[in-house]
């Protein structure tokens, strides 16, 4: 790179940072397009309502489920365009509506069955039942009750057997999109009589669904065969939606509420504020560390991290990704993980400078040598993110997309931005080797393999301790794991206080009393927006504990006991969530095994890496068991994040072993080679784990409870992942390699 290009590159970097800063803070246009304030927020951040329904009776068909989901989606869109409706299992439907105000009214309305009616144009006395309004849209001139009383409703949804979109040709052989209807036997008779009367009177028959006239077709002939067509100027997609709407009206699915949550926006405000502060502090610590250790390249990496942060916020807007609390954790975690690739490169650069190469040659060689480890490590993390997205739900999905986006963003900033800045610094005349990293004598190889029996013993002991405590917890009736409400159900208690309390006041003054009364140390708090009501979610409370709960509220806060209501949440979700957790880990593990096997052309690399991953998962599980950390939605996210993260260090070590096996001297002991490779990558393993740990630790210290539940086990996983990568994986590969000979 020439000096002029170096200057231009640095100027463009400053411009890019300024542009990203302006975009994220202000945005463009009247709406502030691209600004961070316009990022779509999830239910846990913006507040709103969440409800899960289960279909009563026999297992419904997938077609019936799809149609019901479409019906509910149409309904909730009137409350929020960001509302989502999705299927859980075979017979459950979940709805999330962020930003709503009148949550109780919405909960009452959502479960009501849809209504489909076929209405005559005029009643028996010749009065119009519907007419065009000033906007050119049809509207009813009477209420449904009045239409029913005077006999103007000729059919309803139960008379429709099926409805399908189709494409046909009109008399001029032009393509026309239509909806084909078929009626039940009784509906066929009713429709034949209705069309005969409408044809004679030259009238229309309107189709009314869920509060709206969706079609007003003309009657061209008497229809006796139970078949009909709805035509008009519409696309095939519109015809398909209309057909679905009509089918929905005739469904007999009955929904019952399993659980519902009302979330106040204040929870989100607190979470965002603390997470942003944590991110800023963690980022500052990483900047200082990188600059102190790697000097000028560290400065380049820090600048690239600023660009990374700006890009991730812009991309969240661009891809319309809904940001949730775990998503914030995933982004901040991504900042720590983005350091990894830089550390790999800079460690390689330092090695080459130690070997006597020039700064320029060292930069080129370092980038080249680090490329395979960076790509393969990040691909494995993308596999974990994909599994999160495919197998997770709710908060788990909320982590997956930002995590995947962060991985891609980090690779771009490292391989393009950091590289460009470093080369620009060199091009403008900064050639002094000292500013590119302190050259140190190569560390004497540490005999890790000589201590493999001790390392294996520690790992086995940690795993066994977990199983022992599972048995102890189960024997004491406490449950093997401390499952949260999402897993095992529980009791939701709504308390109306005489004044509105802040979340800080609730956590400090009210929650401890509830913990003492119920014996539950994992009380979840949700505020009902705009009221003095607070929802406390606890383990399932028997009568004596409910009475103790109520007494604590009455005695300490003068609450009217009549204004305390309790509701048990269904436990039917637990089996699915446990199953999803196991399946997600298994799928991620198998995919990673296959990928590593394919890339390293050695099943022993893949097997030892996967065994180490399972070791990390089981050790973290041991922590969950002993510390009684709540096992909720974030459990799956935490486990899979650990799986994706811990394998990265392993791949770096294996990449070095693969590289040096190609140049292995004849007669060199394999143990010496493996120890040398682990030692040469040790600094990278420590630095990466340290920076990531710091980011998560700050998040834990400053985060809200839902973030803490994610961060604490993750810190354990980071430490465990570093230990297994350095002390276990290389030893496992060595043992399998020696035994295969």
Image (cartoon, rainbow, N blue to C red):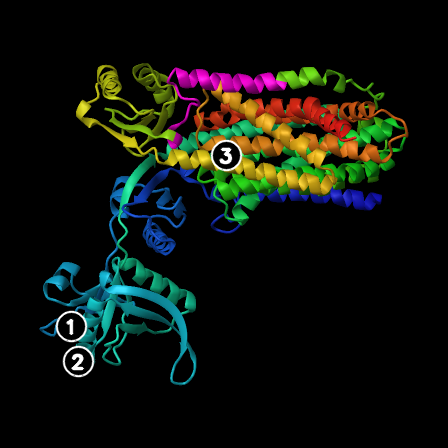
Per the rendered image, the range of residues in magenta is 459-487
Q: Nearer the viewer, residue 536 or 158?
A: 158
Q: Earlier in the sequence, mark 3 or mark 1?
A: 1
Q: Which mark is residue 612?
A: none
Q: Which callout, 3 or 1, points to the residue nearer the camera?
A: 3
Q: Main secondary structure of the magenta part?
A: helix
Q: In which quarter of the view is residue 650 placed?
A: top right
Q: On the picture, is 320 further left or further right than 70?
A: right
Q: Which callout, 2 or 3, points to the residue nearer the camera?
A: 3
Q: Which residue is mark 3?
A: 582
* Mark 3 → mark 1, Cα distance in angstroms: 61 Å
Looking at the rendered structure, the secondary structure element under dot 3 is helix
Q: Which residue is mark 2?
A: 201
Q: On the picture, is 24 further left or further right than 172?
A: right
The structure residue drawn at horizontal position 44% and vertical position 15%, both measured from the top left corner, is 472
Quadrant in which the C terminus appears: top right
């Amino acid at each position: 790179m020439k000096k002029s290009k170096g200057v231009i590159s640095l100027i463009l970097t400053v411009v890019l940072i300024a542009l990203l800063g302006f975009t994220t803070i202000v945005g463009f246009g009247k709406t502030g397009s691209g600004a961070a304030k316009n990022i779509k927020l999830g239910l846990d951040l913006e507040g709103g309502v969440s409800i899960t329904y289960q279909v009563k009776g026999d297992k419904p068909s997938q077609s019936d489920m799809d149609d019901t989901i479409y019906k509910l989606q149409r309904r909730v869109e009137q409350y929020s365009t960001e509302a989502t409706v999705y299927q859980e299992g075979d017979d459950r439907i979940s709805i999330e509506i962020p930003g709503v105000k009148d949550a109780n009214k919405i909960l009452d309305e959502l479960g009501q069955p849809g209504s489909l009616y076929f209405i005559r144009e005029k009643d028996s006395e010749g009065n119009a039942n519907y007419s065009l309004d000033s906007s050119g849209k049809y509207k009813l001139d009477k209420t449904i009750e009045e239409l029913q009383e005077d006999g103007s409703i000729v059919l309803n949804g139960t008379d429709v057997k099926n409805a399908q979109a189709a494409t046909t040709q009109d008399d001029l052989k032009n393509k026309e999109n239509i909806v084909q209807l078929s009626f039940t036997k009784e509906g066929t008779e009713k429709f034949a009589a209705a069309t005969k009367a409408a044809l004679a009177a030259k009238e229309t028959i309107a189709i009314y669904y869920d509060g709206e006239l969706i079609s007003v077709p003309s009657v061209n002939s008497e229809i006796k065969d139970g078949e009909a067509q709805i035509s008009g100027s519409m696309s095939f997609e519109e015809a398909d939606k209309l057909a679905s709407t009509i089918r929905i009206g005739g469904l007999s699915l009955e929904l019952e509420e399993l659980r519902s949550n009302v979330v106040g926006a204040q929870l989100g405000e607190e979470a965002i504020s603390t997470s942003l502060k944590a991110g800023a502090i963690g980022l500052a610590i990483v900047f200082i560390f990188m600059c102190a250790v790697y000097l000028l390249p560290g400065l380049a990496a820090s600048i690239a991290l600023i660009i990374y942060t700006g890009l991730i916020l812009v991309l969240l807007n661009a891809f319309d990704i809904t940001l949730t609390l775990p998503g914030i954790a995933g982004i901040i975690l991504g900042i720590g993980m983005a350091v990894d690739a830089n550390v790999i490169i800079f460690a390689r650069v330092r090695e080459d400078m130690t070997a006597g190469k020039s700064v320029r040659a060292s930069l080129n060689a370092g980038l080249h040598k680090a490329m395979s480890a960076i790509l393969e490590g990040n691909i494995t993390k993308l596999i974990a993110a994909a599994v999160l997205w495919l197998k997770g739900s709710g908060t788990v999905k909320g982590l997956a997309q930002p995590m995947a986006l962060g991985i891609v963003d980090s690779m771009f900033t490292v391989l393009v931005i950091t590289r460009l800045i470093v080369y620009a610094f060199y091009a403008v005349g900064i050639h002094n080797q000292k500013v590119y990293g302190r050259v140190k004598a190569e560390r004497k190889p540490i005999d890790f393999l000589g201590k493999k029996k001790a390392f294996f013993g520690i790992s086995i002991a940690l795993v066994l301790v977990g199983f022992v405590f599972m048995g102890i917890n189960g024997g004491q009736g406490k449950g093997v794991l401390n499952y949260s409400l999402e897993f095992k159900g529980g009791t939701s208690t709504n308390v109306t206080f005489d004044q509105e309390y802040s979340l800080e006041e609730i956590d400090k003054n009210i929650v401890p009393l509830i913990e003492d009364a119920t014996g539950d140390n994992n009380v979840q708090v949700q505020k009902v927006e705009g009221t003095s009501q607070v929802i406390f979610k606890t383990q399932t409370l028997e009568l004596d504990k409910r009475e103790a709960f109520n007494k604590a509220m009455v005695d300490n806060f003068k609450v009217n006991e009549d204004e305390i209501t309790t509701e048990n949440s269904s436990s039917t979700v637990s089996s699915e969530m446990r199953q999803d957790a196991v399946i997600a880990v298994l799928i991620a593990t198998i995919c990673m095994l296959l990928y590593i096997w394919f890339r390293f052309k050695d099943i022993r690399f893949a097997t030892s890496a996967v065994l180490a991953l399972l070791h990390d998962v089981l050790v973290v599980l041991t922590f969950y068991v002993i510390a009684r950390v709540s096992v909720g939605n974030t459990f799956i996210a935490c486990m899979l994040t650990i799986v994706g993260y811990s394998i990265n260090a392993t791949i770096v070590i294996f990449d070095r072993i693969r590289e040096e096996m190609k140049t292995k001297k004849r007669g060199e002991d394999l143990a010496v080679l493996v120890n040398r490779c682990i030692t040469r990558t040790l600094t990278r393993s420590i630095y990466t784990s340290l920076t990531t740990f710091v980011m998560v630790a700050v998040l834990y210290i400053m985060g809200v409870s839902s973030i803490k539940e994610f961060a604490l086990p993750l810190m354990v996983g980071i430490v465990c992942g570093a230990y297994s990568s350095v002390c276990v994986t290389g030893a496992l590969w060595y043992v399998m390699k020696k035994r295969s000979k």
